[in-house]
Amino acid sequence: MKKSGFIFENNELPRAGGFLISDPFQGDAYFERSVVYLCQYDENGVFGFVLNNPLNLKLGDVLDQSSFPEHPLYIGGPVAKNQLFFLHTLGHRIHHSLPCGQNMYFSGDFDSLTSYHQEVSIQENQLRFFVGYSGWDQGQLEKEIQHHSWIAVNNLDQSYIFRQEVHNLWKECMDAQGTKFKIIARFPKNPSDN
């Protein structure tokens, strides 16, 4: 899709440990101006979590006797919205964690996470909780990228995953892609508002 003389694309390929940045005009409730961290990208499919869709709830609001009552919750995507997931930097100290890339790990045993937290206080910049996730069937994401719904970017580090203030995360990630994307990042959501 052409945007005022610019094409929303780059030459990077998606990969586990990388990010997706959505088209600025994508009118999807879950993905409008979203940034997704990809945990898996292989022949079995693709999944990850929207990083900038806070739920305005803390884990203590939804789990009784949580060891992480003040950790915020995020909507990770439209799949499995009744399940809790987490990303962390704690590696295999959390049993059954799965590596994603960039020293990031996906979920693992929640009791192991709780036990580790009792020994060593886990900070918010090491752990993020999500309700639901974002998933694509084999070949689906590639088609969406061809239709300029997403760009894959691999130049962002894990600090973007744990940003406390996520209101401007999409714009910050776009700015990090260079001049062309800085211009696109400043387009209003509704082009007729320009």
Image (tube, rainbow, N blue to C red):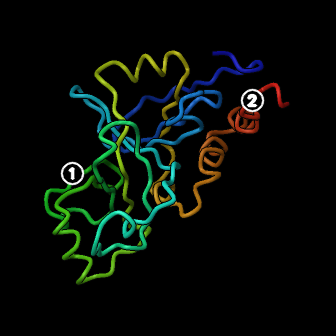
Please, which residue is most extreme toward the left here? Answer: 96
**Alpha carbon distance from label 2 to label 1:** 39 Å
Name the kind of residue labelled 2 in the image: Asn
Residue contact between numbered discs 2 and 1, judged by CB atoms under 8 Å: no
Q: Secondary structure at mark 1?
A: strand
Left or right, residue 122 beside residue 51: left
Establish if 30 lies above or below 148: below
Say whether residue 36 is left or right of residue 139.
right
Residue 43 percent location from the top left of the image: 22, 25
Q: Residue at x 62, y 45 (%)?
A: 176
* Residue to which mark 2 is pinned: 190
Residue in the picture at 55% in, 20% down:
148
Residue 2 percent coordinates (x, y): 68, 16
Residue sitting at x 77%, y 20%? 4
Q: Which residue is mark 1?
A: 98
Q: Quadrant of the N terminus?
A: top right
Q: Residue at x 40, y 24 (%)?
A: 141
Q: Is residue 32 above or below residue 73?
A: above
Q: Please identify the quarter of the rendering in which residue 32 is found.
A: top right
Where is residue 76? Give x, y as percent: 40, 46
In the image, farthest residue toward the bottom: 119
Location of residue 25 with respect to 129 vertically, above or below: above
Dividing the picture into quadrants, the one containing residue 50 is top left
Which-is-in-front pick, marks 2 and 1? 2
Disc 2 crowd, CA 10 A, few/some/many (<14, 14-19, 20+): few
Residue 49, x across and y down, in percent: 40, 44
Q: Residues within 10 Å of mark 1 (few under 14, many from 20)?
A: some
* Amino acid residing under circle 1: Leu
Nearer-the-camera pick, 141 or 157 = 141
Screen quadrant of the C terminus:
top right
Question: What is the quadrant of residue 107 in the picture?
Answer: bottom left
Residue 148 is tagged as: none
